[in-house]
Image (tube, grey):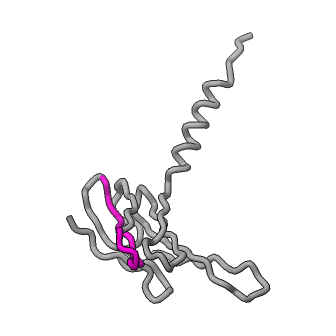
Amino acid sequence: MLHRSPLPVMVVLACVGSVRAENFMFAPAPHQELNRIFRVDRATGEMGACNYAIKDENSVGLTLCYPAGEGAKAGEAGDYALVPSNHRAEAGIYRVNRRTGDVSVCFVRGDQEVVCTPPAR
């Protein structure tokens, strides 16, 4: 009878788990008066954003999330990241494609959706 160690299977599962843990990157908006966090899918560049809102004084509040709109939907495959500006009153964030060097600025428009400028270098 052949005995196989479960160690190789556990190593493979640990590697798969760590890859999945890096599918998204999160970063806060640089605006100091805004409680918003941005999310980017690292492979597709699709953007999203969420922030906290008070529902009424007797609740813990709500998490409001904004879907991807114009320019913020999944696009060219790449290695995307988020870079906040150093501007204290900036509500948007830079989305960068580390493979191509493309940069776009993304922000929440009209408290309805995340939009991004066309990529540029």
Q: Residue furthest top?
A: 1
Q: In which image quadrant can residue 93 be found? A: bottom left
Q: Residue furthest right?
A: 58
Q: Over which residues does the magenta segment extend?
A: 86-98
107 relative to 25, above or below = below
**Residue at 59% across, 30% down:** 11
Q: Position of residue 81 (x, y in %)?
A: 39, 58
- Locate the C terminus by quadrant: bottom left
**Residue at 43% across, 57% down:** 42
64 or 9, which lies in front? 64
Q: Position of residue 26 (x, y in %)?
A: 49, 62
Q: Is residue 119 left or right of residue 66?
A: left
Q: In which image quadrant can residue 44 be found? A: bottom left
Q: Position of residue 13 (x, y in %)?
A: 61, 37
Q: Position of residue 1 (x, y in %)?
A: 74, 10
**Residue 111 part of the magenta-drawn span:** no
